[in-house]
Image (cartoon, rainbow, N blue to C red):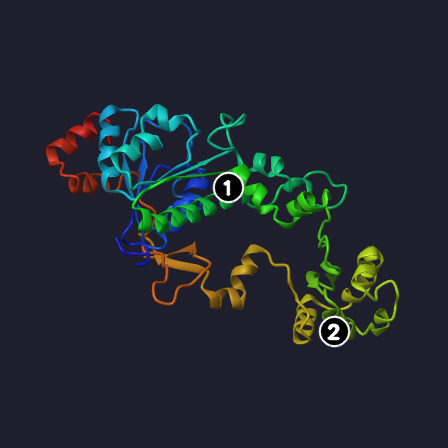
Amino acid sequence: MASSSTALSRFTVLDLTRVRSGPTCVRQLADWGAKVIKIEMPEGLDAGDPMGGPRQGPDFQNLHRNKRGMTLNLKHPEGVAIFKQLVQEADVVVENFRPDVKDRLGVGYDTLAAINPRLIYASISGFGQDGPYAGRPGFDQIAQGMGGLMSITGLPGQGPVRVGIPIADLCAGLFAAQGIMVALLEREVSGRGQWVQTSLLQAQVFMLDFQAARWLMAGEVPKQAGNNHPTSIPTGVFPTADGHMNIAATGQRIWQRFCEVLDRRQWLEDPRYGSSAARSQNRDALNAEIAEVTRTDTSANWVARLNEAGVPCGPINAIDQVFADEQVKHLGIASYLNGGSNEPVGYVAQPMTLSRTPSTIGSHPPRLGEHTDAILAELGYDADRIAALHAQQVV
């Protein structure tokens, strides 16, 4: 198995996660070279569809690259015993069960920390490991609603609108990965592991950022603002001759350049638009006047002219247009790896680069139990014992 990076190659991660938030966390570690063992129930023992889509579908494939995989029945005492053997040499365990499940299986933090005091144990849940909602099932859109995001997304008066990506899931996974890295750094000083916890609800509330600060510091309850920026005017979506574009002409100097490109220097003298405060107060009238001008030319022409003048702007791309964009291509955010038929398979690569230890897509997601026998052999199991474990559906 090709290494994805050398940056985290000294760490071993046991992956008990499913669906999205947990796999997102572990993907961050796997993509930077951590030795990840993805643990799943043996075929036929797991009911339903816990993976968030077909195994060969784009969603699963993009979440689980750069990992080894084994099957292990954690409802069987011998399966738990094997897992505890793995824990002895592991650095990290990541799980996103409901809070009570891990202890019921016998793989909770206290149990595993007693085996390996250096272990970093990361838990992602819907609402937290304790508290009045701890037992509730978590789901991204529920967190978007409870965390306030749907109240500020969409057009004014439209009613609640979900964001088009599972942002609570994704951010919870990213924050868990960050927490793991902080705990690993602290372990270098203390020599001790610890329990990292986050939830979809915590991640979503944190991601409110300045909107949350408006309430906490100023007592202001933000509302839906549609495509308008809530505080920086004019910022938003404007029609063009062939579609729409984004413009962010905020700040007095940029506002002046914007008026010059649109050949509307009179707006600089108009008391309704002369200052940032005035533009904010008269945003609807200003947006309507801007739209009359932007409709007269194409998106591409406006983007070129405004960027040349130093006015922030850009097209509004469909997903296919995103990956056709010359800057996206240059950044290498789409990474390709030959598949079984030698046809290249595209993955969404890491969004940051390191000069000496870059991340790559080293391997496709494992087939169910693909590395089970090899991992058991590394633990000292011989062929006969491995065969017996298969026969007993322990693995």
Q: Give the quadrant of residue 192.
A: top left
Q: Residue at x 58, y 34 (%)?
A: 142
* Disc ID at residue 257: 2
Residue 8 or 66: which is nearer the viewer? Answer: 8
Q: Name the image quarter holding residue 102.
A: top left
- The reply to whether residue 154 is in sight is yes
Alpha carbon distance from label 1 to label 2? 40 Å
Residue drawn where x is 84% and y is 69% of the image: 267
Amino acid marked by disc 2: Arg
Amino acid residing under circle 1: Asp
Q: Residue at x 61, y 44 (%)?
A: 163
Foreground pick, 307 / 202 = 202
Q: Which mark is residue 169?
A: 1
Q: Position of residue 247 (x, y in %)?
A: 70, 63
Q: Is residue 149 above or below residue 1?
A: above
In the current view of this chain or complex, which residue is farthest to the front?
Answer: 190
Residue 26: percent from left, percent from top: 38, 45
Is disc 2 surrounded by few (<14), some (14 to 19) or many (20+) residues within 10 Å?
A: some
Left or right of 89 in this view: 323: right
| Pick the front one: 166 or 195 | 195
